[in-house]
Amino acid sequence: AQSHVLWPEIDRITAEQLHYARQGVGEGVWELFAEDGEMRMYKREEEVNGLVVDPLKAVHTVKGVTGFEMCHYFFSPDYRLDWETTIEQMKVLEKVSDDTMIFLQIHKRVWPASQRDALFWSHLRQVPDSRDPDAQNIWIVCNHSTEHHSAPEKSNGKYIREKSNGKYIRVFLTVALVCQTMIEPPKNGAQITRDDLTCKITYCSVVNPGGWAPASVLRAVYKREYPKFLKKFTHYVYDQCKNKPIRF
Ligand SMILES: CCCc1ccc(-c2ccc(S(=O)(=O)CCO)cc2)cc1[C@H]1C[C@H]1c1ccccn1
């Protein structure tokens, strides 16, 4: 993908998001708003031009899967409709390379706000750990809004069923899923099994709704949808992997 026009931006945003994901939530600005088992979900309340763009950061620990497996199921279009419940339609507009694609997603309407779509590149990458050079166990998927000739801001009906008003408000998003595999080597030198695996997850998301929506509505939607999404997604990956050979 190094030759693609988007490559410099993909490289820069992915590196920025990795750094951002690694920053702790200790500094007081993050507000814990959801907990479920090992999952902790934090937000910051921010508005841009009166629009709610609350950054979100979630940390979670899932036993029995690797960081690669978690990122693979998050990245691949083949499984998305199995775990993403807020999407009405999804299309891969361009396959830039095996690890980079451009998606167009129509999200379900969040009443009373009008319906939105999201157009973004998605990039999957293994990350050398600066602090531990031989840690080959960190993977990231970064999703970042982009433009594409085949899906201008106004839904042109060519690919996606035209709604009555012929237009979806386009959100602007940056999302990162960073996953690290921890292995508890079996005492007796036996082969590693899924019981020896733990996946440490950091999920970061900033979604600008692109057009006005009541702050109270958006905050209620995020409070409900994000915990549901991360719980459903991680359970889905565990179920998909549990009877399959481990992929690092
Ligand atoms: C008015 C904003 C509408 C809206 C647009 C977009 C998104 C959204 C898009 C992408 C991603 S992802 O993590 O990249 C997974 C791929 O789909 C997550 C969220 C969420 C909402 C809102 C519907 C809410 C929501 C919140 C959390 C999870 C899912 N949906």
Image (spheres, rainbow, N blue to C red):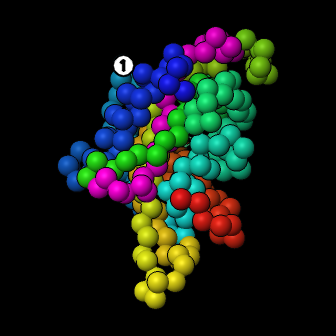
Viewport quadrant of the N terminus = top right
Task: Indicate the position of residue 123 as horizontal and vertical percent values.
Answer: 52, 35
Return the residue nearer the eye: 129 or 85.
Answer: 129
Quarter holding residue 184? bottom left
Write the residue at 62% across / 36% down: 98
Image check: 137 left or right of 99?
A: left
- Residue located farthest toward the bottom when viewing the structure as drawn: 188
Q: Nearer the viewer, residue 61 or 48?
A: 61
Q: Is residue 94 visible?
A: yes
Q: Which residue lies at the image location 76% right of the left edge and 22% below the top edge?
A: 160
> Relative to 196, is 54 on the left or the right?
left
State which region is magenta: 132-155
Residue at numbered disc 1:
49
Residue at the location (31% across, 53% down)? Answer: 133
Magenta region, mostly helix, strand or loop? loop
* Image position, residue 76 (x, y; %): 65, 43
Dot 1 amino acid type = Asn
